[in-house]
Image (tube, rainbow, N blue to C red):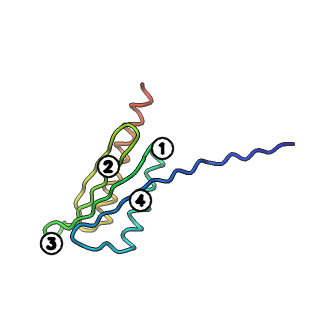
Amino acid sequence: MLIQEQKKKEVIMEVRIQAIHFDASEQLEAFVQKKVSKLSKFYDDIISAEVTLKVVKPESAKNKQAGIKLNIKHGDCFAEKVNDTFEASVDECIEALEKQLAKIKEKIRTK
């Protein structure tokens, strides 16, 4: 009897994190890496992700800005959010990108 194993193809997405005017902690970079890599569940053809973290107007309450640009097979997706913490900003960006990826996937299916 022959038993075949089916291995799930592992897709490695390149994630570049850029912290502007501050040094991002390893903990923050690990958080961003983990969140962005989960987007591959929603869309298989993500080539790379560029994450930009920036502090805007240090005196205001909501001053942590995160921008995520996804390079995908059929174009680009982008989301930019501002919140109290970088984690919250990244979470909101991820939610917005999930919706964008779902729309793109649906458009491809209907063609």
* Picture layout, residue 47 above or below residue 56: above
The extreme top residue here reads: 111
Per the model, the C-alpha gap separating discs 1 and 4 is 15 Å
**Residue 45, quarter of picture:** top left
- Residue 44's tag is 1
Per the model, the C-alpha gap separating discs 3 and 1 is 38 Å
Looking at the picture, how far across and down is residue 75, in whole percent? Answer: 34, 39
* Picture layout, residue 61 above or below residue 74: below
Asked if the residue at tag 1 contacts the one at tag 3, i.e. Cβ–Cβ closer than 8 Å, the answer is no
The extreme right residue here reads: 1
Name the quadrant of the N terminus.
Answer: top right
Report which residue position mark 3 lands on. 58
| Amino acid at dot 1 | Asp
Looking at the picture, how far across and down is residue 30, in whole percent? Answer: 42, 68
- Residue 35's tag is 4
The mark nearer the N terminus, 2 or 4, is: 4
Looking at the picture, how far across and down is residue 61, in whole percent? Answer: 17, 69
Sort mark 2 into few (<14), some (14-19) or many (20+) by Cα contacts within 10 Å.
some
Q: Residue at x 13, y 68 (%)?
A: 57
**Position of 90 compared to 61: left or right?**
right
The mark nearer the N terminus, 1 or 2, is: 1
The mark nearer the N terminus, 3 or 2, is: 3
Sort mark 4 into few (<14), some (14-19) or many (20+) by Cα contacts within 10 Å.
some
Q: Out of 54 and 86, give the one closest to the viewer.
A: 54
Name the quadrant of the C terminus.
Answer: top left
| Amino acid at dot 2 | Ala
The mark nearer the N terminus, 1 or 4, is: 4
The mark nearer the N terminus, 4 or 3, is: 4
Q: Nearer the viewer, mark 3 or mark 2?
A: 3
| Amino acid at dot 3 | Pro
- Residue 96's tag is 2
